[in-house]
Image (spheres, rainbow, N blue to C red):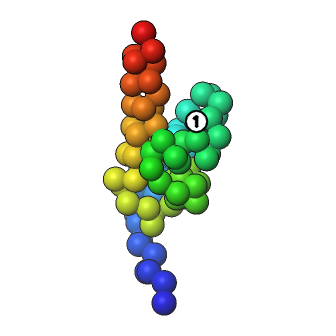
Amino acid sequence: MGREKPILLPKYQRILNELGENIKLARLRRKYSSQQVSERANISRPTLLAIEKGSESVSIGLYLEGTCGSWVGERSFAISQR
């Protein structure tokens, strides 16, 4: 048996879709592969793809890992190279 799919109001589903789209656009602008971002955020690649699609079954904490985790790692690396 799988987990039950959460039911969201359309307003909140649009927010998740927009957030996922923004995460994907940021990744593509930086020319990162989904594998690179998932490794930096310490999440699986299928989870990252679910986040980018705006899936309501992914926890909000993982949405934050997908955004903050990878970009903070990038900034830390750039600072350490100075």
Task: Point out residue 47 in the picture as x, y percentages from the top left corner.
Answer: 52, 58
Task: Point out residue 72 in the picture as x, y percentages from the top left corner.
Answer: 39, 31
Question: Can see residue 15?
Answer: no
- Number of marks: 1
Secondary element type, mark 1: helix
Name the residue at 58% across, 55% down: 45
Q: Is residue 82 above or below residue 7?
A: above
Name the residue at 52% across, 57% down: 44
Q: Residue furthest bottom?
A: 1
**Could you tell whether 24 is left or right of 42 in the image?**
right
Name the residue at 48% across, 84% down: 2
Q: Is residue 2 above or below residue 75?
A: below
Task: Point out residue 15 in the picture as x, y percentages from the top left corner.
Answer: 44, 49
- Name the residue tied to disc 1: 27
Question: Can see residue 48?
Answer: yes
The kind of residue tagged 1 is Arg
Q: Is residue 24 above or below residue 81?
A: below
